[in-house]
Image (tube, rainbow, N blue to C red):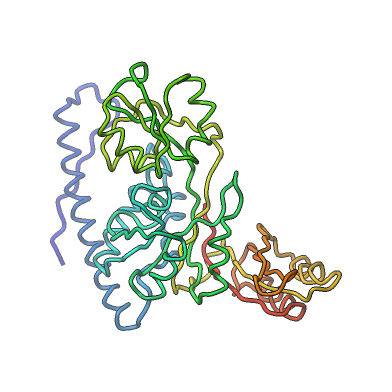
C-alpha cells in the first residue's frame, strides 16, 4: 500500500488575501491527490481484470458503468455539470478498462462518422476503433471475434429505423448489450472566415439537414457534395477558401477550426445506437428489453400477441415490422419494452407472448440510455 499524501489545506472562499499563486498551489496539491487516487483506482481495476480472466467474465459491464454514472450524478453538487462529470469519468473508466483488457470496437466507417462518435461516447478513447464498410460487416467482425463489440445505428428521430440493422438480427446470435443516443449536430468548419467562404463541402445527408441554414447564411455559394462528413473536413483542410459541414469528431480529427456551431435545421434530431456483443447485463432497475417475434398470418393474431404486454403492464417504446423475405405477407416484428427479462412483469409478458406467437427471440436486456 502506498503512503498517503499529506492532506490538502483548502483556502477559504472569499478570502481577500488569497493570491493567484495561492490558488495555483492548492490546485497542484489537489492534482497530486487525484493522481494518487487514479493510480490506486487503476490498480484495483487490474485486480478486477485478473478475476474476470479466471471467471471468464466480460470486461465491458454496462450495468456497472451505468450504476457508477447514476451514483456520481446523485452526489454531484457542482460547479461541474452532470454532462462534464460523465465525460471525465468516461475517460477514467475507459483507461481503467484498457488496463483490464484493451477492447476492439467495430463501427460503420469511415473514421469521423457519427457511428465513430457513438463508439467514442460509449467506450471512451482508450480503445481500438476499427471502421468497416457496412452494418453487416460490423456484425461479422464481432461474430468472428475480430472485434469485441460493434456499434450500429438503429433509429433516427427524423428518418426512422435503419432496416439494415434490424435485418441482421435474423441471422446472428449476438446480443444487444447497451444503447446510447447521439445528438445529430453539425458544424461549419473552415480555415477562413464565414464571409470569405467560396465553396462548401458536405455529404448528401448533412446538406439536406442543414439546407435552411446554408440558404440563409451562405446564399449562392457553390456546394460540393462528398461521400462523408470526414471527407468534407479533409477537403476543407486542403482548400483554404472553403468550408465543410461536419460533426465535432471529424473537425477534431482533421484539426479544422469551427466558425459556426449547431447549423442543423432540427436541433432535436438524434440517432439511437446499439452496442452488440455477447454480454447479458444484469438488471439495474432502469432497463430496456429488445425482442423479435412472428405470428400466424390470421386476423387478430398480432393484436392478441401484443395484448400480452398490456396484460402485465409492460410499457412498449418501439414496434417495427420487417418482411421475412421468405414468404409474401409474412413479417417479423421488433419490439422494445421497458424492464429487464429478469423482472417479473416482463418475464410473464414474454411467457404469454410465446403462447401466442410462432417464435419469440430476446435480442437483449440492457441499461436504458439516460
Judging depth in this view, the residue of 276 and 100 nearest the camera is 276
Give the quarter of the figure containing the N terminus.
bottom left
Residue 188, picture quadrant:
top left
Residue shown at 37% from the left, 76% from the top: 144
Residue shown at 52% from the left, 66% from the top: 366
Judging depth in this view, the residue of 320 and 238 nearest the camera is 238
Residue shown at 30% from the left, 36% from the top: 235
Q: In the figure, 146 relative to 129: above or below?
A: below
- Percent position of residue 193, x then y: 32, 20
Residue 226, picture quadrant:
top left
Extreme-top residue of the structure: 195
Report the number of discs: 0
- Percent position of residue 268, x then y: 56, 38
Q: In the figure, 232 relative to 370: above or below?
A: above
Extreme-bottom residue of the structure: 54
Asked whether, in this view, residue 337 is left or right of residue 179, the answer is right
Residue shown at 30% from the left, 83% from the top: 54
- Percent position of residue 270, x then y: 53, 45
Asked whether, in this view, residue 283 is left or right of residue 57, the answer is right
Q: In the figure, 334 relative to 182: above or below?
A: below
- Percent position of residue 83, x then y: 42, 43
Asked whether, in this view, residue 165 is left or right of residue 355, the answer is left
Q: In the figure, 191 relative to 138: above or below?
A: above
Amino acid at each position: 500500500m502506498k503512503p498517503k499524501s499529506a492532506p490538502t489545506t483548502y483556502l477559504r472562499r472569499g478570502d481577500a488575501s488569497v493570491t493567484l499563486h495561492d490558488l495555483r498551489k492548492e490546485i497542484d496539491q489537489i492534482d497530486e491527490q487525484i493522481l494518487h487516487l487514479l493510480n490506486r483506482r487503476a490498480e484495483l481495476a487490474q485486480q478486477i481484470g485478473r478475476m474476470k480472466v479466471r471467471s471468464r467474465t466480460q470486461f465491458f459491464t454496462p450495468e456497472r458503468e451505468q450504476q457508477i454514472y447514476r451514483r456520481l450524478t446523485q452526489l454531484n453538487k457542482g460547479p461541474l455539470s452532470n454532462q462534464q462529470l460523465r465525460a471525465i469519468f468516461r475517460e477514467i473508466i475507459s483507461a481503467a478498462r484498457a488496463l483490464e483488457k484493451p477492447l476492439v470496437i467495430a463501427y460503420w466507417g469511415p473514421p469521423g462518422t457519427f457511428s465513430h462518435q457513438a463508439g467514442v461516447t460509449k467506450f471512451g478513447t482508450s480503445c481500438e476503433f476499427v471502421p468497416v464498410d457496412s452494418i453487416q460487416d460490423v456484425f461479422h467482425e464481432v461474430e468472428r471475434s475480430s472485434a469485441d463489440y460493434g456499434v450500429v445505428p438503429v433509429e433516427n428521430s427524423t428518418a426512422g429505423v435503419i432496416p439494415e440493422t434490424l435485418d441482421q438480427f435474423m441471422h446472428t446470435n449476438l446480443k444487444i448489450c447497451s444503447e446510447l443516443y447521439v445528438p445529430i449536430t453539425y458544424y461549419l468548419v473552415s480555415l477562413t472566415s464565414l464571409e470569405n467562404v467560396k465553396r462548401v463541402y458536405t455529404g448528401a445527408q448533412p446538406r439536406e439537414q442543414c439546407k435552411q441554414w446554408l440558404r440563409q447564411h451562405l446564399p449562392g455559394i457553390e456546394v460540393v457534395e462528398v461521400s462523408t462528413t470526414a471527407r468534407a473536413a479533409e477537403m476543407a483542410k486542403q482548400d483554404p477558401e472553403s468550408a465543410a459541414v461536419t460533426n465535432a469528431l471529424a473537425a477534431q480529427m482533421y484539426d479544422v477550426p469551427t466558425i459556426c456551431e449547431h447549423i442543423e435545421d432540427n436541433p432535436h434530431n438524434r440517432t439511437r445506437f446499439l452496442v452488440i456483443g455477447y454480454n447479458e447485463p444484469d438488471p439495474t432497475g432502469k432497463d430496456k428489453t429488445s425482442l423479435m417475434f412472428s405470428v400466424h398470418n390470421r386476423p387478430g393474431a398480432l393484436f392478441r400477441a401484443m395484448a400480452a404486454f398490456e396484460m402485465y403492464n409492460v410499457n412498449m417504446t418501439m414496434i417495427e415490422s420487417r418482411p421475412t423475405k421468405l414468404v409474401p405477407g409474412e413479417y417479423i416484428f421488433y419490439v422494445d419494452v421497458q424492464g429487464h427479462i429478469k423482472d417479473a412483469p416482463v418475464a410473464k409478458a414474454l411467457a404469454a407472448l410465446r403462447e401466442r406467437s410462432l417464435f419469440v427471440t430476446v435480442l437483449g436486456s440492457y441499461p436504458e440510455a439516460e
